[in-house]
Amino acid sequence: MLYEITVLQFGKMLKNLGNILNKADLYAQAKKIDVEVLLNFRLFPDQFNLIKQVQIACDTAKLGVSRLTGKEAPSHQDQEKTLEELQARIQSVLAYLGTFSDNDFQGAEERKVSQPRWEGKYLMGKEFAIQHAIPNLYFHVTTAYSILRHNGVEIGKKDYLGEMPFKK
Amino acid sequence: MLYEITVLQFGKMLKNLGNILNKADLYAQAKKIDVEVLLNFRLFPDQFNLIKQVQIACDTAKLGVSRLTGKEAPSHQDQEKTLEELQARIQSVLAYLGTFSDNDFQGAEERKVSQPRWEGKYLMGKEFAIQHAIPNLYFHVTTAYSILRHNGVEIGKKDYLGEMPFKK
């Protein structure tokens, strides 16, 4: 199930985030606001701005999956300043996620996962996915959403969740 | 894995949310603010306020797990007005989550899950957990967090994520 709760669902959420950013762009145009005002907005002075929230959402998806599987991730320089550049970054991570299959996750639950800032400590892959990567991914997507919601962009839960595979 | 990504992790996140609310309470006391000002705050006029975010986070955990397993959930009346009442609601859901074990999730992935507003449509249990319950749970916990962060409560990612089961 790790493949589905990380690769597939992270990809879905990044697509949703891209759609939400497009709605922010349309809103900015309609209100004659420079969209970069929104991109640089934050809810409190020491919070990361919207650009950084999108960058971290992308990195959480990319690095989370890379650490679970050992498959090298593309590097990004955190230099995005425009909406187009942010969308390109999302697309780049979606392309990377698209290279995975369920097979890449064999043994991932028991893989020891660490990050530079953890100073040698590690989590088991399953713990890392469930308690770290997944909550972080949703945190940054929701925070990006909240920044835009606070600024009046007309987005709702459906934009966040995306399409559901409903059956009748 | 459904038990771990729902029951265990939802419980952890609700505990983290309770701790975050306690920090909001201390902040309100220190600033001589009525904590109910924070509880009734929202980031935009048509957004749910903090009380409702906590109520929905509780319901997402409770009803998500109930629908996946068929085990009846306790009912709550959405009448909380104070911090103590919200904490009691969180505790009530934690007690309910505490009645589950991995065994309750046998067959849950293939269970047909519906909600009243879906008008007869359904998702498979695994889809419901991954694409609906989990993203919703994190959405409302993060939104509660963002409302408090916007009001200056000194909380950070560690408060949101909670303790990690690090190994050396």
Image (cartoon, coloured by chain):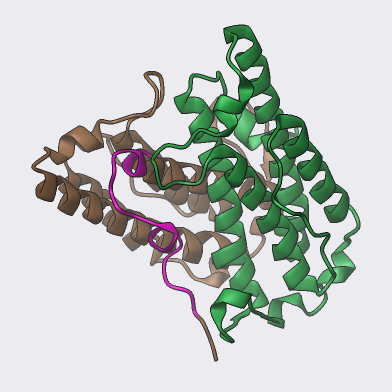
Chain colours: A brown, B green
The picture places residue B58, in percent across and down from the top left corner, at 70, 50
- How many numbered dots are placed on residues in this image? 0
The x and y percentages for residue B152 are 49, 19
User: In percent of the image, x 58 and y 14: which residue is there?
Assistant: B33
Left or right position of B67 against A80: right
User: Closer to the camera, B107 or B81?
Assistant: B81
In the rendered view, tell whether residue B92 sits above or below residue A108. above
Whether residue B163 is visible, yes or no, is no
Q: Which residues are magenta?
A: A147-165
Return the residue nearer the eye: B106 or B92: B92
Q: Nearer the viewer, residue B47 or B9?
A: B47
Screen quadrant of the N terminus of chain A: bottom right
Q: Is residue A55 magenta?
A: no
User: What percent of the width, then of the height, locates residue A48?
Assistant: 38, 28
| Residue at position x 53%, y 59% in the image | A6
Quarter assignment of residue A81: top left
Image-based side of B167 in relation to B100, left or right: left
Q: Is residue B122 above or below residue B48?
A: below
| Residue lying furthest right | B99
Q: Position of residue B138 (x, y in %)?
A: 57, 49
Q: Residue at x 40, y 39 (%)?
A: A56
- Is residue A155 in the magenta section? yes
Question: Closest to the observer: A128 or A23?
Answer: A23
In this view, which residue lies farthest toward the bottom? Answer: A168
Quadrant including the C terminus of chain A: bottom right
The answer to whether residue B24 is left or right of residue A160 is right
